[in-house]
Image (cartoon, grey):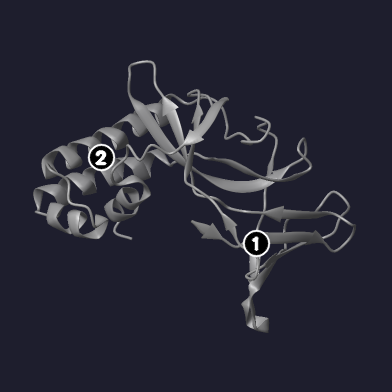
């Protein structure tokens, strides 16, 4: 997969950073043998002094709705549509449905027991700040965004520009963490979740 990086600069000082948002899935092996799945957002980490990937903990109520909605869709004959969207029909559609439901149920069980707040994936700190990117699309620059509420340590605003003429080749990876968010290792994504994030979006009707 080829991705364009984003260059970040600050209006108040010489800070600069280049960000490549490679596809990443977070996996949480559970003590009972299950495995939860989550995704990431980004935030400013004071310890790393940079924008970093951070855990995005799924909402318990949304997970409950996803499980109930997914069960209804499966019972209503939605499996063929899942197969068509994936482009690689499984040998057993019922097995696909059961595996996806098990993944969602594992994730709900983990989320209910999670005690720690979301952590920075770079250093493990829970002391990070959300970054609010606002597009400059109204000015004709759809590839440029800036922060409004967030301020850099110097007081300046951050500016982010997509660099379309520069591309990086990235392969999907997974970060394996403890249930409380300590990173154990990073490895190639084994593709074990047949639906992955598509399953979450489909179950929410997106």
CB-based contact (under 8 Å), mark 2 and mark 1: no
Q: Which residue is mark 2?
A: 100
Precedes in sequence: disc 2 or disc 1: 2
Q: Based on the displayed image, in which of its 4 quarters is residue 186 positioned?
A: top right
C-alpha distance separating marks 2 and 1 = 32 Å
Q: Which residue is mark 1?
A: 133
Q: Position of residue 180 (x, y in %)?
A: 52, 24
Q: Position of residue 73 (x, y in %)?
A: 16, 52
Quadrant (top left/top right/bottom left/bottom right) for the C terminus: bottom left
Q: Position of residue 194 (x, y in %)?
A: 28, 43
User: Which residue sits at x=65%, y=67%?
Assistant: 134
Closer mark to the observer between disc 2 and disc 1: 2
141 left or right, relative to 186: right
77 left or right, relative to 53: left
User: Which residue sits at x=84%, y=59%?
Assistant: 156
92 vs 178: above or below: below
User: Which residue sits at x=13%, y=56%?
Assistant: 80
Say which of 72 and 95 sits in front: 95
What is the secondary structure assignment of the residue under circle 1?
strand
83 vs 97: above or below: below
Say which of 121 and 58 sits in front: 121
What is the secondary structure assignment of the residue under circle 2?
helix
90 left or right, relative to 56: left
Say which of 18 and 180 sits in front: 18
């Amino acid at each position: 997969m080829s991705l364009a990086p984003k260059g970040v600069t600050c209006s108040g000082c010489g800070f600069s950073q280049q960000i490549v948002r490679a596809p990443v899935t977070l996996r949480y092996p559970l003590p009972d043998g299950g495995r939860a799945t989550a995704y990431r957002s980004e935030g400013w980490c004071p310890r790393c002094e940079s924008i970093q990937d951070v855990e995005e903990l799924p909402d318990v109520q949304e997970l409950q709705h996803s499980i109930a909605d997914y069960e209804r869709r499966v019972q209503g004959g939605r499996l063929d549509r899942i197969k068509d969207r994936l482009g690689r029909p499984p040998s057993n559609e019922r097995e696909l449905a059961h595996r996806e439901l098990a993944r969602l149920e594992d994730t709900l069980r983990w989320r209910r027991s999670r005690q720690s707040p979301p952590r920075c994936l770079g250093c493990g700190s829970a002391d990070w700040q959300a970054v609010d990117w606002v597009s400059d699309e109204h000015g004709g620059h759809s590839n440029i965004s800036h922060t409004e509420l967030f301020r850099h340590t110097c007081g300046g605003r951050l500016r982010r520009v997509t660099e379309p003429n520069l591309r990086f080749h990235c392969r999907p990876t997974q970060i394996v963490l403890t249930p409380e968010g300590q990173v154990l290792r990073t490895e190639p994504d084994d593709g074990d979740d047949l639906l992955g994030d598509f399953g979450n979006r489909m179950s929410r009707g997106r």
